[in-house]
Image (spheres, rainbow, N blue to C red):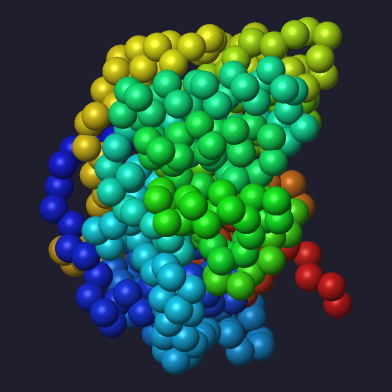
Amino acid sequence: MARGHQTTAAPDAAERLARLRLIRTENVGPVTFQHLLARFGSAQIALEHLPDLARRGGRRAKLKIPAPADAEKEIAANEQAGGRLLVIGEPDYPAMLAQIEGAPAAISLFGHPYLFLEPAVSIVGARNASGNAVRFTEKLARDLGAHGIVVVSGLARGIDTAAHTGSIESGTVAVVAGGADIVYPPENAALHARIAAEGALIAEAPIGTRPLARHFPARNRIIAGLTRATLVVEAAKRSGSLITARFAADQGREVCAVPGSPMDPRCAGSNGLLRDGAHLIERADDVVSLLLRGGVREEPALPDLFSMSGAPPHPTGEIDEKARIRLLSILDATPLAVDEIIRQCQLSPPVVLTILLEAELAGEAERHPGNRVARRYNPP
């Protein structure tokens, strides 16, 4: 996943504000954000073209684009809460995270960005973890910290809490599903405050956002994206931890698991990962050996997409309406890979990507992980 070293120019103040406005625009998600930057070369230019793109995609209502003052208020809200807002492309934005598909365009950061420069492993698992699993996780996290490895987790009950507790003194990063200022679960208030002060705490959702069920899968992709390996300690068959492991695999990162009792349903998912080829982990040395084999200390580079140097890609010209109808007729509620859409509709990739971009902005289509797209059926 890592690319060769390159020089990327950080966004200036105007572009930084424009990137925040762009990601907060209606129907613009992280993948759409990336496509817009790739097409126009800057968020400032993309914002100028959004209304026309949405109109061509079939939207009649005015697209809701935040005013500059709204973006400035969000930046100020982060600072008032004791953190700061980073947009992708800024020097302190985590370079490992910037490499993944659909990387967050903006994150709130509380704490110390130097932790993103260190080798890191994510540890996730059951909220209702067994006592032995909690004890094992705390020791594992402590031992990894002794090797200079930062531990990333989601600040949930059970395994997440144990992972942060074991690594708080050596270096821990918490990724939360709501706003960075919102404590969840409530019993982790002291841990939340300590991580924000001594470690790093990040969130994709704006300040003040209460965590909802739909926020957690997005949070899980960030946990995996920050690290070269994701380790699952305990996980049932249908578990958010398995979603994190799947994101790690899709991102080209290592997937690891701790073996558990076949009699305990909390271990069914993690044992299943081992059957599917995940690395078996019994001690910190197993993780260290795996990371060193993968060149964990290689400095990752930001994707070319976010460089502000060079000419922006030339936009595709006017598209035949029949081609648009043919492509959208292929889509339904089940996500379909973009490569398959190109194959079935027999249109060139630039035309397909343009139609999909316009349809997303119009609210007629939506992106899903794995470069897949589904039709969005809006109520009459």
Rendered view: 207 above or below 222: below
Q: Please, is residue 164 above or below residue 314 in the view?
A: above
Q: Quadrant of the C terminus?
A: bottom right
Q: Residue at x 72, y 22 (%)?
A: 131
Query: Height in image: 12 above or below 241?
Result: below
Q: Report whether 369 appears left or right of 52.
A: right
Q: Quadrant of the N terminus?
A: top left
Q: Can residue 49 be seen from the camera position used here?
A: no
Residue 153 lies, in percent from the top left, at: 54, 40
| Residue drawn at x 59%, y 19% as measured from the top left | 136
**Relative to the observer, which residue lies in front, 201 or 255?**
201
- Spot occupied by residue 217 in the image (x, y as percentages of width and height): 65, 47
Q: Nearer the viewer, residue 121 or 360?
A: 121
| Front residue of this view, candidates 312 and 252 | 252
Q: Nearer the viewer, residue 25 or 236?
A: 236
As drawn, the residue found furthest toward the right would be 380
Q: Quadrant of residue 60?
A: bottom right
Q: How far across and down, in percent of the image, does residue 140 sit? A: 50, 21
Residue at 64% across / 32% down in the picture?
159
Name which quarter of the figure residue 214 lies in.
Answer: bottom right
Q: How many badges with numbers are in the image?
A: 0
The residue lying at 42 percent from left, 21 percent from top is 143
- Residue 264 appears in view: yes
Q: As drawn, is 302 to the left or to the right of 166?
A: left
Asked if 90 appears above or below 67 in the picture, the reply is above
Left or right of 12, for residue 273: right
Q: Specify whether 15 is left or right of 330.
A: left
